[in-house]
Amino acid sequence: MVNYRSLFELEDAQDRESARERERIDLGDEYIGYYRSRMHRMMESFHEFCAREGIADDPDFRHELDRVSEMTDNNARQTDRMLIDLDEEFWRMKIRHSDEREEYIASRRTE
């Protein structure tokens, strides 16, 4: 642990670290939502275009549309798992912060 001059300084550093990590998680979640929305709109538009052209029921088209849809869903699920991991790390960091705070307080009592 870095030597801090005061409990306030330690807590301030921990608060800044927590805020950075929380922002990272929140931005990731926002980007995933944007990705899903954008991909679904693109697939819907593509399907509408193909329906107008009369090829929406073509087996090759359906296969590729299904493949892209599955790939999109897999990417989003994988990213969701990564965010879950980041969130778990965040809470482990909060526990570590609490432990550091208690250690700091205990070390000041012995001085």
Image (cartoon, grey):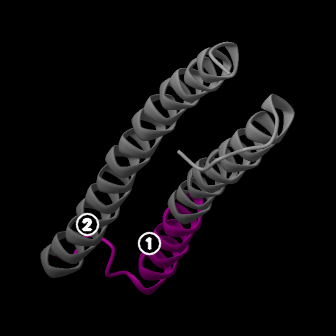
Residue situated in front as seen by the camera: 59 or 78: 78
Q: Is residue 79 left or right of residue 6?
A: left
Instruction: Read off the magenta span.
Output: 37-58
Indicate the quadrant where residue 84 lies: top left
Above or below, comparing residue 60 to residue 109 in the picture: below
- What label does residue 109 carry, if any? none
The image shows residue 111 at horizontal and vertical percentages of: 68, 21
| Residue indicated by mark 1 | 47
Q: Amino acid at mark 2?
A: Met
- Residue plotted at (59% across, 50% down): 2
Q: Are marks 1 and 2 in contact (CB under 8 Å)?
A: no
> Residue 73, percent across and down?
32, 55
Question: Considering depth in this image, is 33 or 88 the residue closer to the camera?
Answer: 88
Q: Amino acid at mark 1?
A: His
Membership of 55 in magenta stretch: yes
Query: How many other residues sit within 10 Å of disc 2, few (<14), some (14-19) or many (≥20)?
Result: few
**Residue on which the image places disc 2:** 71
At x 69% / y 53%, what residue is drawn? Answer: 20
Marks 1 and 2, Cα distance to the nearest angstrom? 16 Å
Q: Which of pointers 1 and 2 indicates the residue nearer the eye?
A: 2
Say which of 59 and 28 sits in front.
28
Please state if 61 lies on the left or on the right of 111 as rendered: left
Magenta span dominant secondary structure:
helix
Rendered residue at 55%/22% (across/down): 103
Q: Is residue 2 magenta?
A: no
Identify whether 54 is placed above or below 14.
below
